[in-house]
Image (cartoon, rainbow, N blue to C red):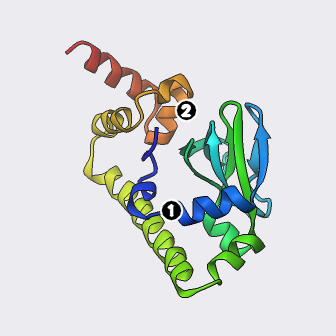
Amino acid sequence: MQDFNRYTSQVDLSPVIDFTLQTGTEKHYRKGDWFVRQGDLCRTIGFVATGSFRYSCTDSAGEVKAVGYTFEKSFVGNYPALLQQVPSSIDIQALCECTVYECTYHQLTRFFEQNAEHLQWKQRITEVLLWEVYERMVALYRQTPEERYREILTQCPHLLQLVTLKELASYLQIRPETLSRIRRRISGK
């Protein structure tokens, strides 16, 4: 499910990946383990060698909302919270058994500050993440729920093997009943 998060194809991350694999600490997560909890300081970022993670947040009514996913061969973490050294606004939880190579804030900062080229990677990663969030927000207005559903299945055909329909509906920002109607309509075509 590479390229679910489009930043992975917009920036050459190979030097950052190599650094993380060489200097990071290998950690294993079981299904349901937390990478970071909402409200806790985000201390690490990781490269997912195997596995998948869910990004979610709890709203003011106490309802958990799915806000993103990351899969193997991409990064996991709350990058903005890590860089700013502020509490995470999201929970990140393992969807299955995962192997992650983690770097601390200090390791990552030292890497970016090594030279001008590394600083450019930091800037480019930040720009592309902003672009990705912006595009997702615009899609909520530009695309119908069915179009968003079809797009996510195209991007990530095996997602429904990892998450429930209720969770997918939350990610798409629609009610589970709406997703059920969309699925019925598509299967009837």
Residue 45 in view (yes/no): no
User: Relative to 184, is 31 on the left or the right?
Assistant: right
User: To which quarter of the image does residue 155 belong?
Assistant: top left
User: Mark 2 Cα within 10 Å, few/some/many (few <14, many 20+)?
Assistant: many
Residue 110 in view (yes/no): yes
Q: What amino acid does circle 2 point to?
A: Glu
Q: Report the residue marked by disc 1.
A: 13
Residue 129 place in picture, x, y as percent = 47, 64
Q: In this view, does 18 lie above or below 29?
A: below
Marks 2 and 1 in Cβ contact (< 8 Å): no
- Of labels 2 and 1, earlier in sequence is 1
Residue 11 place in picture, x, y as percent = 43, 64
Q: Quadrant of the C terminus?
A: top left
Alpha carbon distance from label 2 to label 1: 29 Å
- Foreground residue among 55 and 166: 55
User: Relative to 189, is 14 on the left or the right?
Assistant: right
What residue is shown at x 30% (from left), y 34% (from top)? 146
User: Relative to 20, is 29 on the left or the right?
Assistant: right
User: Relative to 74, is 88 on the left or the right?
Assistant: right
Q: Report the residue marked by disc 2.
A: 167
What residue is shown at x 51% (from left), y 82% (from top)? 117
